Image: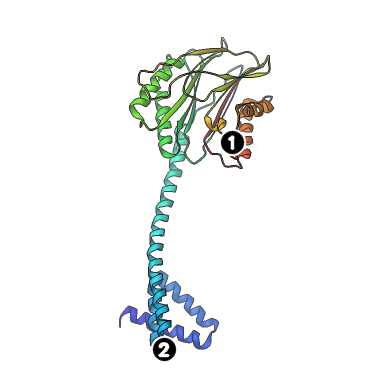
Amino acid sequence: MSTLKLDVNMYKDLLKQYIETKNEQSLYRAEQFSKHSIQQNISPEEIIHVHVEALHELYPDLSEEIGNSMNFLLETMISYGLAYQEYQALREKQLELKSEISVAANMQQTLLSTTKPSIDGLDIGATSYPAKQMNGDYYHFVQDQQGSLGIAIADVIGKGVPAALSMSMIKYSMDSFPENKMHPSIVLEGMNRVVERNVDPSMFITMFYGLYNPETHHFQYASAGHEPGFYYYAQEDTFYDIEAKGLLLGVDRSSTYKEYSQPIHEGDMIILLTDGVTECRVGERFIERDEIVDVIREYKHLPAQEITEQVYHYFERLQDFEMKDDFTMIIIKREV
């Protein structure tokens, strides 16, 4: 006796018992039959097929309309079974990919980690949150042989794995620079050549690099198309844009970058950021730069790290806790 015939007889007995008694015991046996079918990897359309055969054996005079309706159900379940198998396969691939991205995100966090330095007379804060699992923003601190503090902040125009890979390349390229050649213009020119050789032309990277001298309290900087930051002049209680012109990294291998200088007085602040801060959206509109200044002003009495965190949480709430872009902010405050 074939397995299918045995299944039909078993199912026929269960069906007949339920039709005649309509009791809980027959339903329980049907439940056990379903579990057994799942264990044997029997598809829903096979069970419908068994049901049709059992009905015809129990009721040979079954009306043509009922028979046709059961055939319709059988065809429907065949289509459903095929679609469900495809869904399950895609679901498994999705879960596998999600797991791999989670591992990659943790690796990226480790690879891109940087140590916030402790320098007498400076209060330093840095906050970076990805909009998704992978971060397309990057920031880095480095001290050269003369004790000056180098500050890099970069942004890949794009998201996901390609952006994350580009940021990893930026990080390792930065680590390869000799510490005695950390002037902003030299750094950006070197990074421009690296990006031009190694990054797909469809991807764009902006970068800002500054060099703070704790002896003279001068801040030298250059920009490769990066979002302008802010300079807070404490004596006047005024915020100014940090304007610096320069071409995006990787566009032209021969690009040069103009270097600027800014004296930093007691109580002054340097605020560097990515466009995930300035392009925060509220409804259909983007916020104005003056709104960012107002939020920073509200918290400027706090330590630098707390300012960056408070500003992030403010804009997170403003966007209903769904940030549309990666958020990075660095604050360098000269202590009084």
Q: Quadrant of residue 230?
A: top right
For the question of whether residue 43 can be seen, the reply is no
| Quadrant where the C terminus is found in the figure | top right
**Image vertical order of residue 1 relative to residue 231, above or below:** below
SS for callout 2: loop
Q: Position of residue 191 (x, y in %)?
A: 40, 22
**Above or below 115: residue 266:** above
> Most extreme residue toward the bottom, as rendered?
61
Instruction: Return the residue nearer the eye: 216 or 157.
Output: 157
- Residue located 39% across and 18% down the image: 255
Q: Which residue is mark 2?
A: 59
For the residues labelled 2 and 1, the Cα–Cα distance comes to 68 Å
Marked residue nearer the N-terminal end (2 or 1): 2
The tally of labels here is 2
User: Which is closer to the viewer, label 2 or label 1?
Assistant: 1
Query: Is residue 243 left or right of 14 when viewed as pictured?
Result: right
Residue bearing mark 1? 285
> Residue 109 appears at what percent x and percent y?
48, 36
Query: For this view, does 198 lie left or right of residue 151?
Result: left
